[in-house]
Image: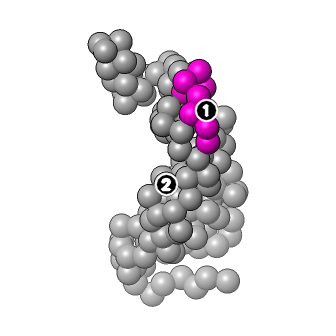
């Protein structure tokens, strides 16, 4: 079991305790502590570990971040297939930024076969929620 770093102060210490007690939101926050080096040594590997715990516990933002981490190889070996799977889970749960990321994966054939219909479907779902990058992407498509 992970130990609470001595460098954490009151609120961060409470968040870490909540993460150790199973809170998916707190796990995601701990991942952010390590990613940003907030009162702990910066560590992409530990950020990945905590993000994975949060995602497996159901945190959709963590699922989306895992997709990004796998896609860039941040804290983990790069795997476009794993990025695609995590973006898919978060997109199915309704997260607009994950829907946009999944659309890009389909559009560019990353981690899956390129599929313009699936790309369009996910781009539309993201834009319906007002996600600005999706709206801008659609605008650029129509200008071509």
Residue at 31% from the left image edge and 15% from the top image edge: 144
Number of labels in the image equals 2
The residue tagged 1 is 94
Image height of 132 relative to 89, above or below: above
Residue 137, quarter of picture: top left
Range drawn in magenta: 112-119
Residue at 54% from the left image edge and 39% from the top image edge: 109
Q: Position of residue 68 (x, y in %)?
A: 48, 52
Q: Residue furthest top?
A: 142
Q: Position of residue 66 (x, y in %)?
A: 55, 56
Q: Nearer the viewer, mark 1 or mark 2?
A: 2
Question: As drawn, is 61 to the left or to the right of 55?
Answer: left
Image height of 67 relative to 109, above or below: below
Q: Look at the image and tell me whether residue 11 can be seen.
A: no
Residue 39, quarter of picture: bottom left
Q: Mark 1: which secondary structure? A: loop
Residue at 46% from the left image edge and 21% from the top image edge: 127
Between 113 and 38, the one nearer to me in the picture: 113
The residue tagged 2 is 71
Question: As drawn, is 90 to the left or to the right of 133?
Answer: right
């Amino acid at each position: 079991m992970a130990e609470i770093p001595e460098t954490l102060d009151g609120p961060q210490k409470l968040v870490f305790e909540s993460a150790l007690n199973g809170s998916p939101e707190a796990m995601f926050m701990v991942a952010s502590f390590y990613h940003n080096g907030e009162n702990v040594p910066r560590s992409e590997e530990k950020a990945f570990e905590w993000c994975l715990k949060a995602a497996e516990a159901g945190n959709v933002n963590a699922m989306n971040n895992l997709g990004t981490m796998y896609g860039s190889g941040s804290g983990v070996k790069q795997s476009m297939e794993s990025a695609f799977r995590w973006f898919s889970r978060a997109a199915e749960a309704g997260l607009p930024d994950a829907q946009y990321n999944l659309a890009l994966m389909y559009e560019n054939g990353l981690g899956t076969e390129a599929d313009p219909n699936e790309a369009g479907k996910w781009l539309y779902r993201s834009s319906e929620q007002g996600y600005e990058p999706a709206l801008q992407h659609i605008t650029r498509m129509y200008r071509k």
